[in-house]
Image (spheres, grey):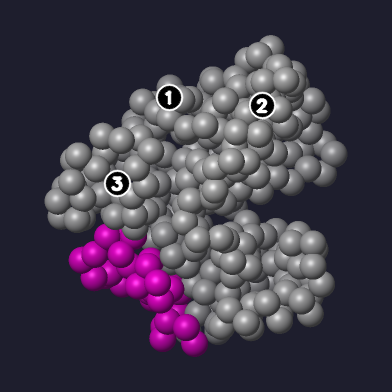
Amino acid sequence: MLASAGLRPSDLDDCENWLPGEKILSVLDETAERAQRDDFGVLLGEFRSFASLGPVSLLLKHESTLRDVIDSIIVHRRLINELIHLRLDDDGEVCRLSWGLVPGLQSSEGVNLLATIAYRILVRSTAIAWQPECIHFRHRPPQHSAAFTRVFDCALEFDSEFDGMSFASKSLASTNAYADPELAAHARRLLSLIPDSGRPESVTDRVKGMVPLLIPTGQADAGNVARCLGISVRTLQRLLKSEGETFSGLVNACRRELSVRYLTRSNHSITDISELTGYSTPGAYSRWFVCEFGMSPGKWRTGNLPRESEYEFAARAVGF
């Protein structure tokens, strides 16, 4: 399996070794498909230790509150894994921590693995007495559900509008029994000496990470994204242009990717999918879909897909 993806078993020996995300995700999904185990990512996640996060684990262990832990994960997420994006939304009553893979890398097992690791970090590996109210998955309910109910000691929602967890806002103030401000400050100083792996994150990368998390809530417009980045809409458009991109083009690519995922891996109706991809009516969504894919979403869903994995099809469909 590793060889078919161009990887060697020895590549996995060093936990500090960075491997191509596309290859890792293809191995995950292909293995799950051959084994007929749609809980494969959860089973793998059970064996990931807190220390496997690397140097960031030193900081997370000693942060004072749940909010501090989540904020530090978001700030340093590229030192944990360059393939993930995270966003915390808080309306004062309910919090929603959304996560996902970078655009172009769709993998149900990758999301299952990410959800398991996130849950174990925030609930099992810190000394914070709390539980999220629910873990959310965009994909349909798994055939193998025992691992999900064993690992996640809370409610589970499949065919959800987002991947992530929801919990009461007051939980953010929950304190960490391991908290040590001096050790946390020391860990931050050490992390500041470690350059972010890979190239610096471009504006395009940052927008690609935000748009999938904002589309289901109807907030994926240039104004909201610019505010999230702390810049004006004009500056956002100028920076994207300098990188050869447009905001509308990035949103359109994200809609294509989400459509492929919802139509192939969820039980959502076309009406639901139209809302989840930011359209107010199914008719508007269907017209867009026909322009992009050459057929109606219903016909596309019921037709026989080529013999290729979900990952390969999604990546090809969005042009990555």
Given the image, on which type of amino acid does mark 2 rest? His
Residue 205: x and y in percent read 57, 65
Local SS, label 2: helix
Q: Which residue is mark 2?
A: 186
Work out whether residue 196 can be spotted.
yes
* Residue at the disc numbered 1: 49
Which image quarter is the C terminus in? bottom left
Q: Residue at x 50, y 61 (%)?
A: 199
Q: Position of residue 50 (x, y in %)?
A: 48, 25
Magenta residues (range)? 291-320
Q: In the picture provided, is 283 more to the left or to the right than 152?
A: right
Label 1, label 2: how far apart the Cα atoms are: 22 Å
**What is the distance, in whole Å, between disc 3 and disc 2 at their CAs?**
36 Å
When the figure is inspected, residue 96 is found, relative to residue 269, above or below; the finding is above
Dot 1: within a 10 Å radius of its alpha carbon, few (fewer than 14), some, or many (20 or more) residues?
A: some
Residue at the spot of label 3 = 28
Say what amino acid the circle numbered 1 marks: Ser
Residue 226 x/y as whole percent: 76, 67
Residue drawn where x is 38% and y is 38% of the image:
16
**Quick one: SS at disc 1?**
loop
Residue in view at x 72 percent, y 31 percent: 68
Residue at position x 82%, y 36% in the image: 93
271 to the left or right of 174: left
